[in-house]
Amino acid sequence: MKLVIVGLGGQGVLFLTRVLSETARMLGHSLAGAETHGMSQRGGSVVSHLKVNEHGGPLVRPGTADILLALDPDEAYKALGYLRDGGVGFVNSGRADFPRPEIAARLAERGIELHTLNADAIAMQLGSPALANTVLLGFALGHPAFPFGYEAVEETLTRVSKARFREANLHALAEGYAHFRPGESAGGKGALEHTIQPEGTGEEQ
């Protein structure tokens, strides 16, 4: 299983990477990974690669990722090329026009599912914009293609979260998980979540 996590510096890409890496190790899986990031403290692009029970080097090659988690819609556009045919992407976006029609058509041709959630809005409702990463992770856990179950990730999140953030992180995970609605078409839930289906079918936290 190959996963790519993308976002901007300060959005919590590295925290999600830690949670997923620790979950994989807890479950006895082999793991390889790498992060590439520029000006992470100034909102620069951050890309994390995770390979679970895979051979070869730590980087995920374009066109081979099973899962994409994107904490920013512009970073999602840059990273969609990582997904393999039939892969699944989860994107934090409140834009009504995301993805652009020509992108949605191309993804459908390749059998790629793209699920979007306004995780930023939910995080604000929960009292902290920093929770958007954990909201998106919970959202992704609702999909059967995701490699880890909710309970395993919840256990890891409980263990790795700093004490003062633990309750908020667990609440955010649960909120994201509750928002996943498999098979719902674009616009089916208004502003918070929509789904594009294929045709025929280290920060502190």
Image (cartoon, rainbow, N blue to C red):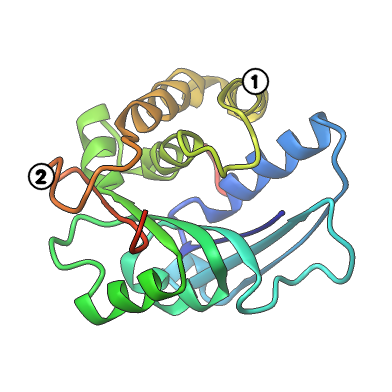
Q: Which one is earlier in the sequence, the residue at label 2 or at label 1?
A: 1
What is the quadrant of residue 98 in the picture? bottom left
Residue 173 appears at what percent x and percent y? 44, 29
Q: Identify the residue shown where x is 66% and y is 71%.
A: 64
**Nearer mark to the viewer, of 2 and 1:** 2
Q: Position of residue 41 (x, y in %)?
A: 48, 65
Indicate the secondary structure of the residue bearing disc 1. Answer: helix
In this rendering, is residue 31 above or below 81? above
Which residue is painted at 40% across and 57% down in the image? 71
Does 189 sit left or right of 23 as displayed? left
Residue 73: image x %, image y %? 32, 66
Asked if marks 2 and 1 touch (Cβ < 8 Å), the reply is no
Residue at coordinates 69% horizontally, 77% vertically from top-left? 61
Residue nearer the viewer, 79 or 46? 79
Amino acid, disc 2: Gly
The residue singled out by tag 2 in the image is: 190
Q: Is residue 10 visible?
A: yes
Q: Is residue 48 above or below residue 62?
A: above
Q: CA distance from mark 2 to mark 1?
A: 32 Å
Q: Which residue is mark 1?
A: 155
Q: Quadrant of the N terminus?
A: bottom right
Q: Nearer the viewer, residue 26 or 162?
A: 26
Mark 1 residue type = Glu
